[in-house]
Image (tube, coloured by chain):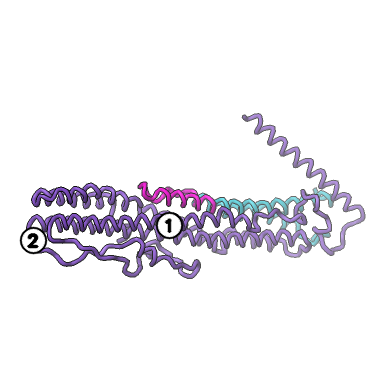
């Protein structure tokens, strides 16, 4: 432990491994959502299919946002650790 | 009835009905009434065949996978839990800010799982509509082909009516849905619904009656199918509205709190280490200098990226 009551190595692992891994898991879904090929070829269903594409597009976008935030938390944590390592003369 | 009749089966049945209708017209001299029915039958065929149940089933499986994985504790949630466990012992506002943001992500995943459940239900409903429409139209074509052949052969007429699915009834049977509670796990479960048929006359007094009865049954069921697609379209637009507008108010779209963001002008060292024997005098200055240095380094990196991207144009 340092004077900051945090195990820097453990926290570094969280920043560099777990948050990026969480983001990767979330992003795995977005590829599936964007992989759809529609419900058929007929004109009668074209409007409904276009709306479905819109829904999956937005859902994938929100999941992307979740992934970005997970990465952002890891980045913020990494920045904090870097700052204190430097300030504490450990880097 | 899994996936319903194929395109080829539908086409062949419709074609066979047309051939029987023309033969009936030739035998009975009722070309006008038969001509109307025959001219309309391709529209009916193309409309009810416009949804492909096999492709819808694939999409259902994809959405089910997404919905279930988003709700599971494995994957992203497990990584977030492990991350938090590695921060044990750290106290302070900065940690609270980061943990709060992690909670935002988990709530976001909950909400996304719920929305995926809603979407999955719509896809399952599309599937049921498609299968019932195809199955009904196939039987309709075959029954009216048989009726035409009976008319040609002056055979005994049948009193029985033809029961075919009406899309509005399919939608009604599948309308109520509580995510998490009634989620149907397989797409074929959406076919397991109460009677959704209506009955139509087949035979009549003569060939014109057969052709007219076909027009009534096929036109009404086709129109109901189109209305059903319009209702599902409206449902999807509602979901899209939720996802495109309401979700933007989610906490996950809020920036990381300044307590945990060293690039924020409001970031303060005290928020990082709360209540612990803070470092030696002058440490705050060291932190401040390093923050400035890291900001400069970050800016230099971003400038370099911009320069490279600019050079690549």
Q: Could one spot residue B226 in this view of the protein?
A: yes
Residue A12 coordinates in the image, percent (x, y): 71, 54
Pointer 2 or 1: first along the chain: 2
Nearer to the camera, B241 or B250: B241
**Residue picked out by circle 2:** B155
Left or right placement of residue B29 versus residue B256 in this view: left
Tell me if mark 1 has few (under 14), some (14-19) or many (20+) residues whose alpha carbon lies within 10 angstroms of its own.
many
Residue annotated with mark 1: B232
First to last magenta residue range: A33-59
Tint of chain B:
purple
Q: Main secondary structure of the magenta part?
A: helix
Left or right of B180: which side holds A90? right
Q: Is residue A2 visible?
A: no
Q: State which quarter of the image contains the N terminus of chain B.
A: bottom left
Which residue occupies the foreground of this view, B212 or B2?
B212
Pick the front one: B245 or B61: B245
Q: Does B306 lie within the magenta span?
A: no
């Amino acid at each position: 432990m340092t004077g900051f009551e945090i195990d820097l190595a453990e926290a570094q692992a969280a920043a560099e491994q777990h948050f990026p891994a969480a983001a990767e898991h979330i992003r795995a879904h977005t590829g599936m959502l964007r992989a759809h090929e529609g419900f058929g070829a007929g004109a009668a269903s074209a409007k409904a299919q276009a709306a479905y594409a819109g829904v999956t597009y937005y859902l994938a976008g929100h999941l992307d946002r979740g992934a970005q935030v997970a990465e952002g938390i890891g980045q913020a944590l990494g920045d904090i650790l870097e700052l204190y390592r430097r300030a504490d003369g450990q880097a | 009835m899994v996936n319903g009749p194929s395109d080829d089966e539908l086409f062949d049945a419709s074609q066979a009905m047309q051939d029987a209708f023309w033969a009936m017209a030739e035998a009975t001299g009722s070309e006008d009434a038969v001509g109307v029915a025959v001219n309309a039958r391709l529209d009916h065929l193309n409309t009810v065949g416009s949804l492909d149940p096999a492709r819808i089933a694939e999409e259902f499986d994809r959405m089910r996978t997404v919905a279930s994985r988003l709700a599971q504790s494995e994957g992203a949630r497990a990584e977030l839990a492990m991350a938090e466990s590695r921060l044990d012992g750290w106290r302070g506002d900065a940690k609270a800010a980061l943990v709060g943001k992690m909670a935002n992500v988990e709530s976001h995943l909950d909400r996304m799982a719920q929305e995926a459940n809603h979407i999955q239900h719509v896809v399952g409903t599309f599937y049921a509509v498609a299968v019932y429409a195809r199955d009904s139209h196939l039987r309709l074509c075959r029954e009216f082909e048989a009726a035409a052949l009976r008319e040609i052969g002056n055979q005994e007429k049948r009193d029985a009516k033809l029961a075919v699915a009406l899309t509005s009834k399919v939608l009604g049977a599948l309308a109520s849905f509580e995510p998490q509670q009634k989620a149907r796990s397989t797409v074929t479960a959406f076919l397991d619904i109460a009677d959704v048929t209506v009955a139509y006359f087949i035979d009549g007094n003569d060939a014109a009656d057969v052709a007219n009865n076909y027009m009534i049954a096929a036109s009404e069921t086709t129109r109901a199918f189109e209305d059903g697609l319009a209702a599902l379209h409206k449902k999807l637009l509602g979901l899209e509205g939720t996802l495109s507008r309401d979700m933007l108010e989610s906490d996950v779209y809020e920036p990381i709190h300044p307590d945990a963001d060293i690039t924020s002008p409001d970031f303060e060292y005290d928020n990082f280490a709360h209540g612990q024997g803070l470092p030696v005098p002058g440490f705050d200055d060291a932190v401040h200098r390093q923050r400035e240095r890291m900001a400069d380094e970050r800016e230099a990196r971003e400038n370099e990226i911009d320069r490279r991207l600019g050079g690549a144009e």
